[in-house]
Image (spheres, rainbow, N blue to C red):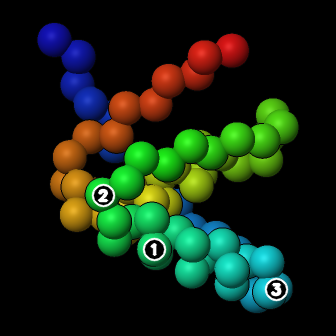
Amino acid sequence: MSVPVRHPEVRLIGRSDAIRTLETDLECAARSDVKVLTTGETGVGKEVVARLIHQRSARASAPLVTLNCA
């Protein structure tokens, strides 16, 4: 049986309008029970966004399973 890996808390860094908009969108997604599809080029931070939504959601105490479909 494998032991779940605990990741340190992930944070966004910055104060730009784009970061503030992203923070608002993350909070909205975390409060809801909707499915979220994050798309983008390699290296843009899709997994960071997923972790942030998970950390801020009601499910934060449950494990987050990530899957790379590449």
Looking at the image, is mark 2 or mark 3 nearer the viewer? 2
Q: Which mark is residue 33?
A: 2
* In-front residue for pair 36/44: 36
Quadrant holding the C terminus: top right
Query: Residue 8 sits in which quadrant?
Result: bottom left
Instruction: Describe residue 13's horizontal placement relative to residue 57 as left or right.
Output: right
**N-terminal label among 2 and 3:** 3
- Which tag, 2 or 1, sits closer to the chain's start? 1
Q: Position of residue 61 (x, y in %)?
A: 19, 54
Residue type of the residue flagged with mark 3 = Ser
| 3 and 1 marks in contact (CB < 8 Å) | no
Q: Say which mark, if any, is on residue 53.
A: none
Q: Can see residue 32?
A: yes
Q: Is residue 32 above or below residue 23?
A: above
- Residue 9: x percent and y percent? 44, 61
* 30 and 14: which is toward the camera: 30
- Please say if 32 is above or below 59: below
Residue 6 in the image: state x and y as whole percent.
Answer: 34, 43
Residue drawn 50% across the image and 24% down it? 67
Residue at which label 3 appears:
16
The residue beneath circle 1 is: 28
